[in-house]
Image (spheres, rainbow, N blue to C red):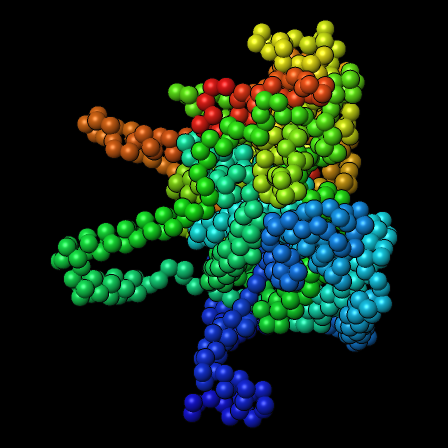
Amino acid sequence: MTDRRDNEMAVPGNEDAALDPHASQPGDPIDNPGLPAHQPRPTDVDEAAEKRAERQVAAMFGLSAVCAVLFCVAYFALDIGSEPDMFGGIGAQNLALGLALGLALLLLGVGAIQWARKLMSDHEIVEMRHAVASSEEDRADTVAALKQGVDDSGIGRRPLIRNSMLGAVAALGLPAVVALRDLGELPGSSLEETVWRKGMRIVNDVSGTPIRPEQVEIGQLVNAEPAVFFATDEEGEPVYEGHELQAAKAKAAVILVRIEPSEISPLPAREDWGVQGILCYSKICTHVGCPISLYEQQTHHVLCPCHQSTFDLADNARVLFGPADRPLPQLPLGVDDEGYLVAMSGFQEPVGPSYWERGES
Amino acid sequence: MMSRPVVARATRTGQVAGWADDRLGLARVARKHLRKVFPDHWSFMLGEIALWSFVVVLVTGVFLTFWYKPSMGEVVYQGSYDQLRGIPMSEAYASTLELSFDVRGGLLMRQMHHWAANLFIAAMMVHMLRVFFTGAFRKPRELNWLIGLGLLMLGIVEGFAGYSLPDDLLSGTGLRIAEALMQSIPVVGTYVAFFVFGGEFPGDDIISRLYTVHVLLIPGLLLALVGLHMLLLVYHKHTQWPGPGRTEKNVVGFPMMPVYAAKAGGYFFIVFGVTALMGALLTINPIWAYGPYNPSQVTAGSQPDWYMGWLDGGLRLMPSWESELFGYTISWNVLVPGLLLLPLLFGLLGAYPFIERWVTGDRREHHLLDRPRNAPTRTALGVAGVTAYGVLWLGAGNDILAIIFDLSINTLIVVLRVLIFVAPVVAFVLTRRICIGLQRADRDRVLHGSETGVIRRLPTGGYVESHAPLSIEEQWRLTAHESPEVPAIGPAANGNGAPRPGARGDRLRTAMSRFLSGHDVAKPTREELEEAHHGDGHANGVDRVSEPDSGHRVR
């Protein structure tokens, strides 16, 4: 019980804590019993325990410093880059640096907390809460000051000034918005267009080589691109490169599949869009634009790895399942004079995700 | 000046402090706050993890900016990583590879930055749940609750921006999806996407724009809001759990100086140290394995960082609904999960304190926390929300789940589509029942003591279990909360039979109030306690043992 007085001792800035009334609310079945007496810790009563705790804390701080030095040793002693895959892909240097830094920090933190828990005073103290709200006088004074300020400005008596000022401030919003105009070009019709043209060859997306129908086996899926992505102009520079290539590729990537012709059920207008059972579809999912790529040759279903929209390539890439609503756009195929697969036209509808202006497909 | 104690000037430290105080007047503030009391409880540490991991993110992030180049300009990689040498890629990706393989400690800092960011958002979410389930959002802390929600939302956007900066295949796919989400906005969507990306996707602007957002704009806002959050915490003083000596008018705990300075300061180093160990031992976002971004490629099992998972899950679970309206397209399948889910969740969370305040009609300040069981409906609503979030989150892993558990992915999605509506309801009902059961158990323990497991045979041949009385502190802890009350309202009509103004709102309020607290178990009254402790006339015939030696106070 003697400890209770300590709990309520006056603290600088906290003198009113001693006033703590253990007030109980009307509905409480018992009265607030008040702060329990302080229980001494072993380190409070046993000098050996206290010394031990002191040594523990100092040892942790000391080891922390050792680890900090070890970090520097590892930084210079171990080679980076030559063995990035050592230790389960972590890399020898990364492992050593991280362990040393981690332990240096951890030991510092654990030491500080051990110090607080074992050796610093653990007497709970009480602080009174103050009212969050300002006093009534403060409020009244503030309102009076504000009113005085408003009156002095005359803003209430001079609506002409007030309104023209509000108008001027509002008008400043226009430059703020207009100045952002050059963030990007306007969409125009760019989402409806791809680089595909009549007669453009369909080439392998890695090697850029054109593809003959007989090179595609039944059940095979080929990731393909328009030949123009591998073409060069008169000066030998690529026609498309850098981010222009990326933007064009984001719309023009296609997949070629060869399916047993008897299993294909083309829409009436699309009966001649394939060549010997080879069909060409946009690779860009009509949901949110991931490149679809998981092909199941037995069922000729293709699955988008992002959100699992599933399309039946034998049935005009109809949506079988998942969040996509529209089939993958199909590219009409033909064969040029040299026997290579070519587009017979561009896509006849926009590829990729839907957007407001897209309208009926 | 004259009244300043001479001793303060005598020492060297005293001189420095005096010099500073002459110019800053620090003593007035420090006097109040050096011994400021913070209550101790493990659950108050969750927000601290968020704070400290934010500091770790700032420190490691500054390190990364010294090497990272926010440019989409094309370069051919010539660095140390063999598998990608000679491949064209953006400078952003190449400099991230440089950080990983050619800057000593760079990979560690990258991984620490990513782990700490994940930890930051996770800790904010768990801290938010703690605040919700304990009612710490009540007056006067509603505004701090809103600031916290703002921090969480900004943290999520900040995480996504940072995740996109390496310009690798995985994050590029994420940006592609983000672009499609923008496009799905009715009327202006296409324009929004073109303005954000500087033209057609991917363009060559987005990485440098995201960089400014990631290292300047959002961190600035986060810092300001964190400061405000802390300032209000100090001003309101921390909430505390009910217990002996704790009241609505005081705060009991340990002083800032030295105990909390050591504990919180030490905790900072522990959080920092743990993220360093994670950076050393746990590979995260190995961008070299994904390759540079290519809009025609993607890997199976693509998933965003965990905190975006629930939104991605929403995209996967949403049925394929699209409408045509006067020749214009509305993609509900993208719009609803992609753009409405986040505002919906944060809107509900932000509105909750005000709804509860309106329903209970409670205008008082609350500094004592609720044990979750003592607010069964609030707790059940929270668990229902967590459950819905969990279903969406599972949805984001549907392909992985299908492989691990050998399930059909289509069946899994259908099941999750049902669960998103059913599971929260089941969770609500179960949680409320469990809370009410726990309230009853508390009431029984206060009235009749704890079960001891000791069975005694009575002279008459019957068997009874002995109950041990609770310590007075424990009894207080179990009864310090308020019993629920449904606010009384006036009659629906006034004396003349005309409807009383506001009667309809009141009826709704009463109905909601019954929903909120109508099922709660009242705590024992003083009379019930007296009777239970002294009267032996219990109908159930159980022997309430009152031997002299079992009635002593435990402490």
How many numbered marks, from 0 up? Answer: 0
Residue A255 position by quadrant: top right
Residue B305, given in percent of the width and then of the height, sits at 65, 43
Which residue is found at the position 53% from the left and 68% from the top?
A: B36
Which residue is found at the position 58% from the left and 87% from the top?
A: B13
Q: Nearer the viewer, residue B477 or B90?
A: B90
Q: Is residue B400 visible?
A: no
Q: Classify the position of the C terminus of chain B by image quarter.
A: bottom right
Which residue is found at the position 66% from the left and 30% from the top?
A: A227
| Image position of B302 with respect to B125: above or below | above
Residue B549, given in percent of the width and then of the height, sits at 72, 53
Which residue is found at the position 44% from the left and 27% from the top?
A: A357
Q: Is residue B451 visible?
A: yes
Q: Residue furthest left?
A: A157
Residue B102, given in percent of the width and then of the height, sits at 76, 59
| Image position of B23 with respect to A350: above or below | below
Lateral position of residue B397 relative to residue B518, left or right: right
Residue B107 position by quadrant: bottom right
Q: Nearer the viewer, residue B308 or A146?
A: B308
| Image position of B43 with respect to B542: above or below | below
Q: Classify the position of the N terminus of chain B by image quarter.
A: bottom left
Lateral position of residue A67 relative to residue B196, left or right: right
Residue B186, given in percent of the width and then of the height, sits at 43, 31
| Image position of B277 with respect to B419: above or below | below
